[in-house]
Image (cartoon, rainbow, N blue to C red):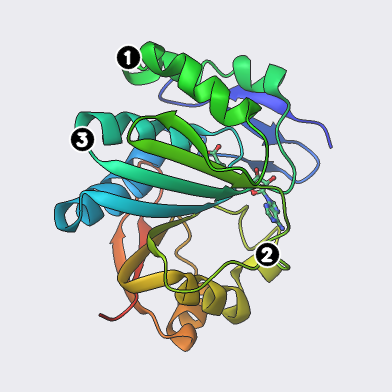
Amino acid sequence: MIRKIITTEDNSKSIQLPEWNETYHSTHGALNESLHIYIRSGLIPAAEKNKTLKIFEMGFGTGLNALLTLDQSVKEKLTVEYHTLENYPVEYELVGQLHHTENEDMDHLKNSFDLMHLCDFSVLTPILDSFSFIKYKDDLLKFEIPANQFNVIYFDAFGPRIQPELWSAAMMQKMFNMLLPGGRLVTYCAQGQFRRNLREAGFTTHKLEGPKGKREMTLALKPE
Ligand SMILES: C[S@@+](CC[C@H](N)C(=O)[O-])C[C@H]1O[C@@H](n2cnc3c(N)ncnc32)[C@H](O)[C@@H]1O
């Protein structure tokens, strides 16, 4: 599938899949979207309760969410174990053309970011002293991982228009099982059927204000 680099409205770059008419991030601002949804609504509230966090990301993609999480973890002195799933890795050369580390003064994290892309799959890799990272090359539909271990899930699959099977009640049950009690899942998707699927899996759902260009996003909580 052809991957085309685009510049989004906040000047950060992302990838477009012309065949699917889909992008890896919001065209209204890739950086702004990742910060708003995953960092400010996912990581930061979780870090208020716990300085040691285990995070799972569905869809490593270009690595922007992982990079921003690394940056925030350094700023807040958090200890993070970051797990991410990606079945169709983006070519390293293409990732370089996105210049993600030039956003938000993250140049000092360039080597760490490169390591995330270049490290082996399925090996827990120390990126910094307090940040370890593991990526799995697998399909979410088949992926198995022990239950009750994550504080936060970033659910960043392509939209339900493209891949409805990834947003099903069965997949949300999988996410629910992976989270610790009190854990949170955040995503850009605010679709009604998806929220019903979350509730069917046992989550409580909350509408939060979306990033620029999107009215709402979803926060789902696993009861304590
Ligand atoms: C919206 S993009 C993720 C963007 C990413 N979080 C970032 O910061 O760049 C969705 C990702 O999910 C991956 N993906 C699609 N179907 C998948 C599947 N069945 N299992 C695992 N990953 C999948 C895609 O290859 C793509 O990288």
- Asked which secondary structure carries label 2, the reply is loop
Name the residue beneath numbered marker 3: 77
The CB of the residue at mark 2 lies under 8 Å from ligand 1 = yes
For residue 34, which quarter of the picture? top left
For residue 114, which quarter of the picture? top right
Q: Earlier in the sequence, mark 2 or mark 1?
A: 1
Q: Is label 3 in contact with label 2 (beta carbons under 8 Å)?
A: no
In-front residue for pair 65/114: 114
In-front residue for pair 90/75: 75
Q: Amino acid at mark 2?
A: Phe
Q: Amino acid at mark 3?
A: Lys
Q: Nearer the viewer, mark 3 or mark 1?
A: 3
Name the residue beneath numbered marker 2: 143
Give the CA separation, mark 3 to mark 1. 18 Å
Q: Which mark is residue 167?
A: none
Horizontal side of 138 relative to 194 (left or right) equals right
Q: Amino acid at mark 1?
A: Asp
- Asked which secondary structure carries label 1, the reply is helix
Q: Is residue 49 above or below residue 67?
A: below
Q: Residue at x 43, y 84 (%)?
A: 199
Q: Is residue 12 above or below residue 166?
A: above
Horizontal side of 37 relative to 2 (left or right) equals left
User: Which image quarter is the C terminus in?
Assistant: bottom left
Name the residue beneath numbered marker 1: 105
Q: Position of residue 123 (x, y in %)?
A: 61, 43
Dot 3, crowdedness within 10 Å: few (<14), some or many (≥20)? some
Horizontal side of 21 relative to 47 (left or right) equals right
In-front residue for pair 36/28: 36
List the single residue furthest toward the right: 1
Dot 2, crowdedness within 10 Å: few (<14), some or many (≥20)? few
Q: Position of residue 74 (x, y in %)?
A: 27, 29
Horizontal side of 45 relative to 201 (left or right) equals left
